[in-house]
Image (cartoon, rainbow, N blue to C red):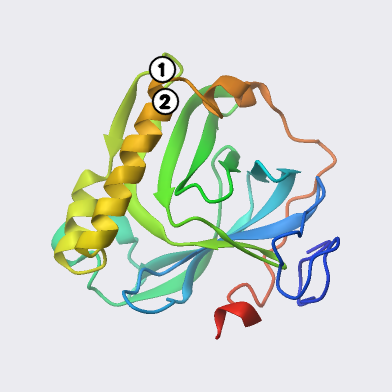
Amino acid sequence: MTGTGGRGDGDAQGGTHDGAPDTRWAPGEQILWRYRDPAPGRTGPVHICRPVTVVRDTAELLAVWMAPGTECVKPVLADGTPVHEEPLATRYTAPRTTVRSRWFGAGVLKLARPGEPWSVWLFWEHGWRFKNWYVNLEEPRTRWAAGVDSVDHFLDICVYPDRSWVWRDEDEFAQARRVGLVDPPLARRVQDAGRAAVEAVKEWGPPFRDGWQDWRPDPRWPVPVLPEDWDRTPAHMTS
C-alpha cells in the first residue's frame, strides 16, 4: 500500500490518528474499501475488503477505482460454497468464513458523498462499453487512516443509460429483516434512503449527470496489493 496504507496509523495529509475528518487522499493513493458483517448491536468483523485507487477525494466526493485483477476478500460459507448459492432461507444464518479472491471482471468506479447512505458504482463491459450505475444502499462510510468502512444494507438499485431503473435484491432485504439483521428502525432508514436515491435518479442529479461514464483510469496506476492486515480494527472503532 502507498500513502496511508499498510500499518501506518499516524498523520495522513494533515489528518490525525486513524483518519480524522480533515484527512484527504491524493489521486493515485491506494486505500481499502471495506464492509463489516451486519451484526445488530455491535460492530461486526470485516467480511469484504477491496483495495482501490483514489481518483478524487474532496469534501463533496470520494471516488475510487477497483482495477481488474485486484485481490479482494469476500465472504463464503464455511465449506467454501459461494454465498449466493445458499438457499435464501439459510443464506444469512449458515456459518461463514472469508477467502481471498481476484476481481476478474472489468473494473469498477465507486462514488460516495460524505454522509450519504449509499454509494454509486459504475460498471463497464470489457472494451469500455458502459453497462450501468449501481446504487448500493449502505451505512454512511467511516473514514480511517487506510480507507473507509461501511455496512451493506442489502437493498440496491440498478440505473441504466436510458435513465430507467429497477430495484435489486428486495428478497435479500426481506430475508435480512426476517432473521434480525435489519431491525424495524433500520429497515425504515434503508427504505427512506432508497426513496431518496430514486428521487436523485428521477431528477438525474449527481453523480448520474456528471459524465463519470466517460472517465478512464490513469494507465500508470498499478493494481493495489491486499495487505496482510486487511481486517485490522482502527483505534477509534474499539472504544
Which dot, 2 or 1, sits closer to the camera?
2
Secondary structure beneath disc 2? Answer: helix
Residue lying at 19% horizontally and 48% vertically, measured from the top left: 171
**Which residue matches tag 2?**
201
Vertical relation: 108 (above or below) 126 = below
Vertical relation: 207 (above or below) 163 = below
Residue lying at 33% horizontally and 40% vertically, measured from the top left: 194
Is any part of residue 159 visible from this angle? no
Q: For this view, does 213 lie left or right of residue 55?
A: left
In the picture as drawn, the residue positioned furthest to the top comes out as 162
Q: In the rendering, at what x and y percent does residue 185 appear?
A: 25, 61
Are there few (<14), some (14-19), or many (20+) residues within 10 Å of tag 1? some
Secondary structure beneath disc 1? Answer: loop
Image quarter of the C terminus:
bottom right
State which quadrant residue 122 falls in. Answer: top right
**Which residue matches tag 1?**
163
Q: Amino acid at mark 1?
A: Arg
Q: In the rendering, at what x and y percent does residue 228 appear?
A: 67, 76
